[in-house]
Amino acid sequence: MGLWTTVAEIAVNLDSKRKPVTKSARESGGYPYYGASGIVDYVDDYIFDGDYLLVSEDGANLLARSTPIAFSVSGKAWVNNHAHVLSFSSYAERRFAEIYLNSIDLSPFVSGGAQPKLNQANLNRIPIPWPSRVEQERFVAILDKFDVLVNDPGAGLPAELFARRKQYEYYSHRLLTFEEKVA
């Protein structure tokens, strides 16, 4: 597979550029405002412009995993202090790290009782397998194709389920429609 490394050695952490803004101080606009689990609001300004991996910093989801704790964002965005912001040198590296972080148990790196927290120091020390760029690209290509098959409404499983439902409706209607017998 390759070498093991840590998050700190493969990504640039941009947490120092985050700026939380209270709901009452936010001006509504067209830029996504991200928190620990995704978009919280839309605001009139941005502090990041590019491709980043956001990793939940706090919240019950770190342990419960009802939504992914790592998610990629692209374009102009505002990120509050509830999500770590990581920058990678390529799509394959960012996506590989995203997939891996979402697949492992983070509880050894999470502190706090009532409010679980993944602080920057603990995030930075998470071990991660780091195969060659070619292998990363291969893994990511395979998993991205699988993701489309499972989640894209216009392709794969969702499209197949839609087609089978339509087929079922057609045949159930045809089978349950009876002609009156003429005497």
Image (cartoon, rainbow, N blue to C red):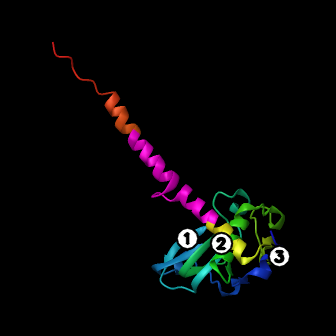
State which quarter of the image contains the C terminus: top left
The CA distance from mark 3 to mark 1 is 32 Å
Mark 1 sits on what residue? 40
Q: Horizontal and vertical percent for residue 10?
A: 76, 80
- At label 2, counting other C-alpha atoms closer than 10 Å, the crowd grade (few under 14, some 14-19, many 20 or more) is many
Q: Earlier in the sequence, mark 3 or mark 2?
A: 3
Residue 137 image-quadrant placement: bottom right
Q: Residue at x 70, y 72 (%)?
A: 136
Residue type, numbered disc 1: Val
- Specify which label sits upstream in the sequence, 3 or 1: 3
The x and y percentages for residue 135 are: 72, 72
Tell me, yes or no, whether the highlighted magenta stretch contains residue 146. yes
Residue wearing tag 3: 5
Residue 12 vertical position relative to residue 153 in the rendered view, above or below: below
Magenta stretch in the rendered image: 142-167
Q: Quadrant of residue 99?
A: bottom right
